[in-house]
Structures are given as structure tokens and as C-alpha cells.
Image: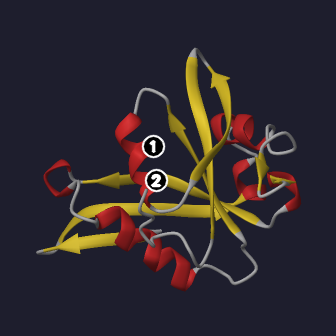
Amino acid sequence: VIVGVQENVVRAFLCASSVQFNTSFALPKAMIDRFPRAIYDSKPLSDWCACISGPVCIDAALRGQGILKMLYECLDTTAPLQYELATVFVSLDNPRSIKAHEKLGMRIVDEFDFNSGQYVIMAGRMRNCGKTVEK
């Protein structure tokens, strides 16, 4: 867990964990079940050594100020080196989060439904997340 603190108050956090850890939870498992069909750079996500990033939360007053980028930069420097990709699921009802993750170089590789909700799976190379990509 990467935690952003300002004036002794937690203002942001980013969680990340292994694929194996996340198979115990219904929503992340629904995403992981799609990994063999979700293609990133010509390979299914199941062929990559990936971690699951998220949830992420940033104080509403601090959004749009580069906090997400800082959280991912910290993840890149602290995550075990074997991880090649960071993956995340984002609700289609949250286009702002999708756009913010795209700015970090992550891209949509698949979509899935869970409990009447629709989600995208996004992936980006570790040691590259957090570096803003201009479009």
C-alpha cells in the first residue's frame, strides 16, 4: 500500500498485490479470469508477470494535481522487480479514472461485466507507469 500523507492526514492511497492474492475476491477474480483473452503487446495478460493495482483513492480536493502519477511512480520504485505489468480494473462509470490511467501509459486491453457493472481492464508496463504519455 502506497500512502500519500499531507499535514498528518492520509489524502491518497494506492494498493497493489499479486494476481494469486486477488483470486480470493470475486471482482478481481472476474478480471483475472479474462487474462487469457486480454492482449497486451501481442501476449495475453496471463503470460505476463503482472500485479493488480488498485484500489486507488485520492482526496477529491487533490484530484487533477498529479497525485496518481506520484503514487504509481512510488509503486514502480518499490514493487518487486519481477513484475512486468501493472493491471487495474476501472468501472465504465468512471471515465475520469480511465483517462487518468491512460495518461500514465496504461491502456484498455479488455472489458468485463460483474454484478450488473461494466469494467475495463487496463495494463501498463512497470517501470513505466507514472510517466505521463502525451497524445
Which disc, if any, is residue 90? none
The amino acid type found where label 1 is placed reads: Ile
Which disc, if any, is residue 101? 2
Contact, mark 2 vs mark 1 (Cβ under 8 Å): yes
Farthest top residue in view: 116
In percent of width and height, residue 43 lies at 86, 55
Which disc, if any, is residue 98? 1
30 with respect to 67 (left or right): right
In percent of width and height, residue 100 lies at 39, 52
The amino acid type found where label 2 is placed reads: His
Q: Nearer the viewer, residue 43 or 118?
A: 43
In percent of width and height, residue 115 lies at 61, 18
* Relative to 23, residue 27 above or below: above
Q: Nearer the viewer, residue 56 or 73?
A: 73
* Relative to 86, residue 126 above or below: below
Q: CA distance from mark 2 to mark 1?
A: 5 Å
Q: Residue at x 43, y 56 (%)?
A: 135
Q: Residue at x 79, y 38 (%)?
A: 34
